[in-house]
Image: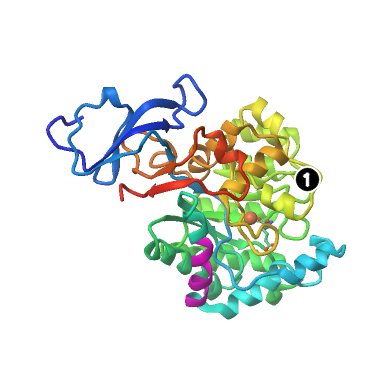
Amino acid sequence: MQQDAPFHGLWRNARLATMRPGEGNALGIVEHGAVAMRDGRIVFAGPEAALPSAEAAEVVDCGGRWITPGLIDCHTHLVHGGHRAAEFEQRLAGASYEEIARAGGGILGTVRATRAAGEDGLIATALPRLDALIAEGVTMVEVKSGYGLTLDAERAQLRAARALEGARSVSVRTSFLGAHAVPPEYRGDAEGYVSLLCEEMLPALHAEGLVDAVDAFAETIAFTPAQVARLFRAARALGLPVKLHADQLSDGGGAALAAQWGALSADHLEHANEAGVAAMARAGTVAVLLPGAFYMLRESVAPLVALMRQHGVPMAVATDCNPGTSPMTSILLAMNMAATLFRLTVEECLLGTTREAARALGRLDEVGTLEAGKWCDLAIWNVETPAELVYRLGFNPLHRRVRRGQ
Ligand code: NIG
Ligand code: FE
């Protein structure tokens, strides 16, 4: 700690949920805390009494409010064209998600709308959704492609995702999800489409700096484990981390497949089996739980949360914001649903949208906890206890959001 230079910012008279492990309680709580910032980074987060100096260009008295790390939504399909309200009505009337998909609706309906929207149109419709997340203290959001399914249309989606970071004060991490569905041009030739993904689309989009990670949808209505493995091999050759939509609708061995490839995360996991969970624990693969999709599809089989806990699988929680299975733009509601529907504890929900969400994006070194050296991304809350963030439905107690010290 440099004693001489004043801080650029100081948030004092606060209660901190640092999310640091090993502080004696799950949330790393510090009463009478302060956070000091220089050049957008945290230089101190701890008891105010231990502050090396109180000299700062800007001092904010938090009035005893709670500070958490800025929230992280680590699984979204935020950038897409159109909506699927009519499909929602069809499902309410009894049609299943798989039936609609096999009939050329579902994801492919959004593919048509996304291709028609163009990059500017995609940015324009994504911004209000992003603003809803930001209003709840989100400072980092993952955004997937996967509704273009041609080189040009996937590029437009990923460029739109990158543009969001310039349009708002938020960090965006992109995932290339070209393996989301077999596009109409390749109907009956999934192998041919996977070749296109591996040989042309992924290398080109990676070369353009548009891809932070590679994702795929392993499912009977999407891609087989062997096809996913081909894609992951191509990702590995480019040095890109992978993640997987795994075992959402059926047990396809997705959890074990993700673990085998050292995936950052395996997501959904409603139908994952115990061997898969154990493999994830060994590989350090994060389970990203998406209760919004579970709720919207009125699923009855929940992920094996107790086993994940027992095996020590890190658990994250995200909105899965997408027009089909989770048209949800509330990370606070996602936490509430993870608790009520999946039986996560309040602490697991809060860690799941901060530290473990950062881990799921491979960004734990720079965000996710209140720790010296990380970006000064903060959410300051009008709550008496952090549990209120999980407990309420449809109420937003955010007081202020800070990203990179601003
Ligand atoms: O995360 N599972 C696959 N992908 C999305 C849904 C996509 C859609 O229906 O448009 C999901 O649930
Ligand atoms: Fe998803």
Q: Amino acid at mark 1?
A: Asp
Question: Is 189 situated above or below 10?
Answer: below
Q: Position of residue 140 (x, y in %)?
A: 45, 51
Residue 204 visible in the displayed image:
no
Secondary structure of the magenta portion, mostly? helix
Quadrant for ligand 2 reads bottom right
Q: Position of residue 119 (x, y in %)?
A: 49, 75
Q: Is residue 228 left or right of residue 383?
A: right
Seen from this angle, which residue lies furthest top? 24
Question: Is 359 situated above or below 320?
Answer: above
- Of 406 and 165, which appears nearest the observer? 406
Q: Quadrant of residue 343?
A: top right
Magenta-drawn segment: 120-130
- Of 80 and 359, which appears nearest the observer? 80
Q: Position of residue 75 (x, y in %)?
A: 57, 52
Seen from this angle, which residue lies furthest bottom? 116
Few, some or many residues within 10 Å of mark 1 (<14, 14–19, 20+): some
Residue 300 visible in the displayed image:
yes
- SS at mark 1 in the image: loop
The residue identified by callout 1 is 251
Based on the picture, tell me whether residue 30 belongs to the magenta stretch: no
At horizontal 54% and vertical 37% (from top left) the residue drawn is: 350
Q: Position of residue 345 (x, y in %)?
A: 63, 31
At horizontal 52% and vertical 38% (from top left) the residue drawn is: 356
Based on the picture, tell me whether residue 127 belongs to the magenta stretch: yes
Question: Quadrant location of the N terminus?
Answer: top left
Q: Quadrant of residue 8?
A: top left
- Of 30 and 151, which appears nearest the observer? 30
Q: Quadrant of residue 43?
A: top left
